[in-house]
Amino acid sequence: MPTFRIAVIAGDGIGKEVIPAGVAALEAATRGTDTSLAFTELPWGCEFYSKHGRMMDEDGFERLAKFDAIYLGALGFPGVSDVVSAGLILAIRQKFDQYVNLRPMRLLPGLTSPLGNRTAAEIDMICVRENSEGEYSGVGGRVHRGTPHEVAQQVGVFTRHGIERIVRYGFEVASKRPRKMLASATKSNALTHSMVLWDEVAEGVRTNYPSIDFRKYHVDALAARMVTHPQTLDVMVTSNLFGDILTDIGSAISGSLGIAPGANINPERTHPSMFEPIHGSAPDIAGKGIANPIGATWAGALMLEHLGRKDLHDKVLGAIERVVAGGKVRTPDLGGTSTTQDVAKAITSEI
Ligand code: NAD
Ligand code: IPM
Ligand code: MN
């Protein structure tokens, strides 16, 4: 019986509320199957930082490297600099070469999009976000601090290798979906070095996928299109920052930021991949027990799929879909009055 070792970093704020919901769903989904998950909870995050002056233990990366996957809630809380807290997420993504950030954005049947009059079939996209370089390379610095001549430089690093592998992954995802469409987010009219290279590399990769309907959009126009014509979009491939912004739009038009999942994938499987909702720690609602656990639970489903159990992924997602379609058990972000635990219980009992 395969047992997968899962590192759980619930983290901060609502991360601590939504991750137990996700774990309960994963336990329910695997119960009675020949796959089991062994969860190890790691108390890392901003509280850990306030006690120890670091976001994780000194040997954190070596320990994480031994797991089959990482299940993350959210990191970040007022009182600790976002540079420090988000720094851990970015470090995990880079160190474990999780260069694909896969983010489905779907209007689940039964939910109302803030766009109005949209059906589930019209909002069904997936973002393949570059997750290791680009605007998030971390290269740069500040000099002449505190003086009128202070300078900050944040260098975007775009490599042919990095662009090539993410665009190829985008084409692969598109070729497995019925609509066979790939939209590339560019900005080569203004970012005349990095995004021109992006476009050139994409044109090259494209020749290997003649059956995919490939189009490039400037990212500003693509953002507008997600709102005005979401039905014309299927798979999109983006740089790191563009994907970050577009996926918050995508989840918002799908009903709530609390719904969308993310998978930080190391396709070569030389390092563990990491699964998390795309939202943050939501300090404004933390501790109230009303966070939507669907994004975290769906992220857990993506983890099952990555571990080779697409059937169990479908089981969890199916349960989420039935709870949402039932319309009775919903957290306030979806217009309901249910708690995180109510939704968690409804999902596990559906499973
Ligand atoms: P956020 O995603 O935490 O919150 C944005 C808004 O969405 C808030 O009004 C919040 O209440 C709402 N929201 C988010 N998730 C929800 C859920 N599951 N259910 C109901 N409502 C939900 O973004 P922010 O406010 O920009 O960031 C807060 C902190 O989280 C910052 O420290 C930031 O750096 C961090 N952050 C972490 C991650 C991560 O760990 N992956 C992601 C984004 C932001
Ligand atoms: C996300 C988050 C992170 C990002 C932050 C916390 C660095 O917003 O996962 O979308 O920008 O990638
Ligand atoms: Mn984000």
Image: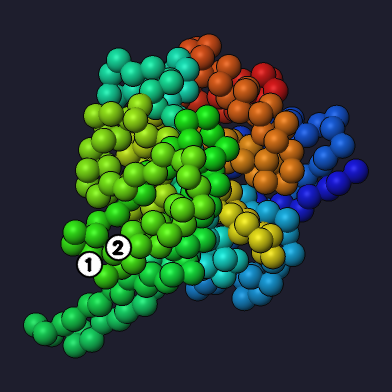
Q: As displayed, is residue 209 above or below residue 310?
A: below
Identify the colour scheme used. rainbow
The foreground one among 246 and 186 is 186
265 on left or right of 155:
right
Percent from the top left, x then y, of residue 250?
37, 37
223 on left or right of 315:
left
338 on left or right of 135:
right
Please tell me whether mark 1 sits on a helix, a strand or a loop: loop
Identify the residue at the far left of this view: 148
2 on left or right of 277:
right
Q: Is mark 2 in CB contact (under 8 Å) with mark 1?
A: yes
The foreground one among 340 and 162 is 162
Name the mark on residue 195.
Answer: 2
At x 63%, y 22%, the residue is: 319
The foreground one among 35 and 220 is 220
- The amino acid on which the numbered mark 1 sits, given as a three-letter code, is Thr
